[in-house]
Image (cartoon, rainbow, N blue to C red):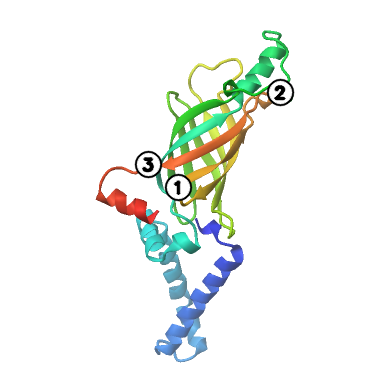
Amino acid sequence: MIFALSRSLVLSALVMLVVAICVGLLGYGYVANPHGLLEWASKITLLISVTLVLLGIRPVFRALHWVSFAKYWWFPWLDGEWRAEIRSNWPKVERMYSAAKREIPKFDSLAGPLTSDDELVTTASVTIETGLFDISIEITPHGTDKTSRTRFVRPRWSKPDRPELSYVYEQTDPTHLAPTDTRQHFGAGIVEYIAKTDELTGHYWTNRNAEAALNTAGTIIMRRVVAAGSMARILKRYK
């Protein structure tokens, strides 16, 4: 999640931390003069390293995120289970493919009327894990053995825009495949977080069977799943 902050802000924070430690050592008399700080250099480095290691532990980082009200100035806490609704243009791509094989009448994707049959709606379970240095997303479409796992996730929050995630993922399908499908493909997406409804919504696209011009694109909406219980209600209120 640290990459949601600008590089200049991260560097400034590190410099301020080192300066604050040095001023504290001088102010409380742990060192007599600035030259004495050199003797503390290894200890200062160790202190910063230990701090980063502790923040790398998810419960510790989550606690810091909560007490520092980071959802207002850093990035929302997206950890947890979500349910996704994915809308794909695959039926339209399939119609063009079938028309090219002359299995159906000629179809012009630009001039042809769009119907509800031109959109495939799939539901999926989503797990998002958040750490100081990384965010991972795993999507499992319902009723299939397919799994999508992110290779890269980049958070961004440039106010007044909404917080957003850009990601690249790999999808694998170990089951029997149709001639138009592939066992593995890559894709990418951009979703933005809507705090009012607690949703992630955006667009995605893939290179699925791109050699045959059968790659797909569409929209995705993810809604947070909150388990029953008092703790879950507290977390939902904090989201």
Vertical comparison of 42 with 237: above or below: below
In the image, residue 210 lies at what x, y percent? 67, 26
Check disc 1 and report the residue beneath it. Answer: 197
Check disc 2 and report the residue beneath it. Answer: 109
Eye-nearest disc, 3 or 1: 1
**Crowdedness of circle 3 by 10 Å Cα count: few (<14), some, many (20+)?**
some
In the image, residue 158 lies at what x, y percent? 59, 58
User: Distance between the Cα atoms at labels 3 and 2?
Assistant: 37 Å
Query: Which labelled disc corresponds to residue 225?
Result: 3
Q: Given the image, on which type of amino acid does mark 1 rest?
A: Thr
Q: Earlier in the sequence, mark 2 or mark 1?
A: 2
Is 47 in front, or is 196? Answer: 196
Q: Earlier in the sequence, mark 3 or mark 2?
A: 2
In the image, residue 237 lies at what x, y percent? 35, 54
Q: Residue furthest top?
A: 103
Q: Secondary structure at mark 2?
A: loop
User: Distance between the Cα atoms at labels 3 and 1?
Assistant: 12 Å
Q: Secondary structure at mark 1?
A: loop
Q: Given the image, on which type of amino acid does mark 2 rest?
A: Ser
Left or right position of 160 against 224: right
At 50% from the left and 44% from the top, the residue drawn is 200
At 55% from the left and 30% from the top, the residue drawn is 87
User: Distance between the Cα atoms at labels 2 and 1?
Assistant: 34 Å
Q: Given the image, on which type of amino acid does mark 3 rest?
A: Val
In the image, residue 182 lies at what x, y percent? 58, 22
